[in-house]
Amino acid sequence: MKTVGILGGMSAASTQTYYRELCNRTRERLGGLHSPELLIRSLDFAVIEELQMAGKWDEAGEILNREAKALERGGADLIILATNTMHKLAEKMMQDVSIPLLHIADATASCILKRGLRSPGLMATAFTMEESFYTSRLTAAGLTPIIPDTADRAETHRIIYEELCVDKVTKESEDTYVAIAKRLVEQGADCLILGCTEVGMLLNQGNVSVPVFDTTLVHCDAALEMVLSD
């Protein structure tokens, strides 16, 4: 079994989900006492969030690059970055790193296309919804992403940072997210991307009327396909 290097901590809540789901899915596939071979570098999200808000993306990229190199030195065969937003820095992160990065947007696009869907709604941080580093990869794959309006983007982003990243889950915020998802469907979305690794704490197939693609789960499945393929 190959070793997955997880670069996480952004936030800790989503990284816990990655670890749990990779373990569950490995056991489901292989049975018995099997578990995945993992290396985890979990960063202090307070430091990263401060750099995000200050627009110091180059500095954040240097941190990610340093940690990606550490995962490679530690014996990882591939890297998964356990956050959608920080894929903004994927290219900088992987400079002088020879092992592959499994890009979360590419894994998600592939999964959507296999279902015959084409117009995903996207709920994520403002960075992921409004900048091109993520949506351009979806478009390049042949998808037409639909994002919420300005007010809904702001509320989606606020709930992620003020609540979900600190493990706060409320019925009020779930209702807000369900309403935003419904408006995306009304705009023509034929499925929904949970495009922040914490959004799945509030939305799932049980409260959304179209197929849901939880990027954390999609990412985990794609990583296991890679490490168990040989």
Image (cartoon, grey):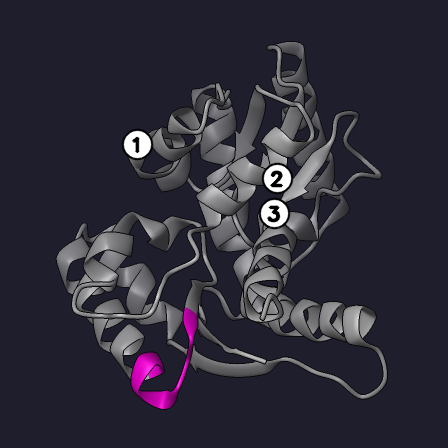
Q: In which quarter of the image is the N terminus?
A: bottom right
1 or 2: tag closer to the N-terminus = 2
Q: Which residue is drawn at 78% across and 69% down?
A: 29
Q: How far apart are marks 3 and 1 (CA)?
A: 20 Å
> Residue 184: x percent and y percent?
61, 19
Which residue occupies 48% across, 62% down? Answer: 82
First along the sequence among labels 2 and 3: 2
Q: How crowded is mark 2: few (under 14 residues within 10 Å), some or many (20 or more)?
A: some
Kind of residue sitting beneath label 2: Cys
Numbered disc in front, either 3 or 1: 1
Look at the image and tell me in which quarter the C terminus lies.
Answer: bottom right
Describe the element under mark 1 as helix, strand or loop.
helix
Marking on residue 199? 3
Q: Name the residue carrying label 2.
A: 111
Residue at mark 1: 132
Rendered position, 34 above or below 226? below
Give the mark nearest the N terminus, 3 or 1. Answer: 1
